[in-house]
Image (tube, rainbow, N blue to C red):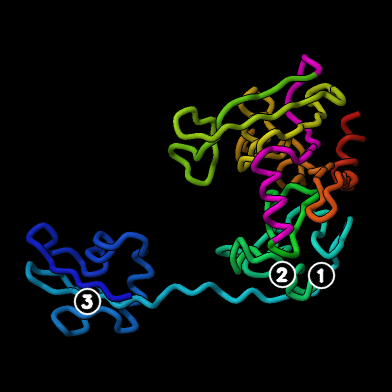
Amino acid sequence: MKQLLTVTEEGKDSRLDAYISGQLDGLSRSYIQKILKNGGVLVNGKAEKSSYRVLPGDVVEVTAPEPTEPEIVAEKMDLDILYEDQDIILINKPKGMVVHPAAGHYSGTLVNGLMDHCRGDLSGINGVMRPGIVHRIDMDTTGVLIVCKNDFAHQSIAEQLKVHSITRKYYAIVHGVIKEDQGTVNAPIGRHPTDRKKMSINAKNGKEAVTHYRVLMRFAAYTYVECQLETGRTHQIRVHMASIHHPLLGDTVYGPAKCPIGGLEGQTLHAGVLGIIHPRTGKYMEFSAPLPEYFQKLLNILK
């Protein structure tokens, strides 16, 4: 990628790296400094350092390498497989496992393990970084996840997700005692206006989000609930339960910054049931994953 920039009066006396960063979207200053170090920036046909102060009329030529996606390596893993056939595979995902590679997580993800297990037989619709992945669950959420082995299955499951016909039941422990036996949170979810890593109830820019919850057990200061998703927005249950003042136990993003129970990592949320129409047979199938050991122990302690 080659870009030519001509410095105007407005940009004069800026450091070269700062000037380029202000002119080109999507390139961080540290990345620009790397390009400079490798001789990828010329000022009036001559290489200059990051600290060079630009002058009006300077012609800055920036040559940035085309971005490449890292190769995702197959890794042997002990996957907890709930069901598998020629089209789909259902996994019981453990706590702490990232679903697919992204910046900072290129190995040890579920996709790395699936690439070894499925020998490359995974749908390609979501690109090389997310083969087979049609929906996700958070790193610290456990439970049932469906993966598609071909594009035919992927399109079928994606359509079911789109029309909200998939059964998805999650189990969670939330702060506080919920008085009513059941309820529904119907509030749109979108990106948080100031914190880009978070989601929030966002009436203006959010997408429709509906969560039905049912009380399974009440404790002194917590409630054990089943949440059934009608839609599947990012962090939906976490955001919705926090919005009614019952954030998930262990969720330091949407709940208390310090978890009251020591040793608990991340939210207590388990994808317990997933029901789909099988892409090939057209029959309804339902899969379930037992509560993980840490979750069961917590319930016993709270009892």
Which quarter shows the N terminus? bottom left
| Image position, residue 169 (x, y; %) | 80, 37
Looking at the rendered structure, the kind of residue marked 2 is Asn
Neighbor class of circle 2 (other Cα within 10 Å; few <14, some 14-19, many 20+) is many
| Image position, residue 150 (x, y; %) | 72, 64
Highlighted range, magenta: 152-181
Neighbor class of circle 3 (other Cα within 10 Å; few <14, some 14-19, many 20+) is many
Q: Are marks 1 and 3 in contact (CB under 8 Å)?
A: no
Q: Are marks 1 and 2 in contact (CB under 8 Å)?
A: yes
Task: Report the residue at 88% width, 35% height from top.
Answer: 299
Magenta stretch holds residue 226: no
| Image position, residue 48 (x, y; %) | 21, 80
Task: Report the residue at 80% width, 26% height from top.
Answer: 223
Q: Which residue is mark 2?
A: 112
* Residue farthest along the front direction in this orientation: 281
Which quarter shows the C terminus? top right
Q: Which residue is mark 1?
A: 77
Residue 38 lies left or right of residue 241; in this view the side is left
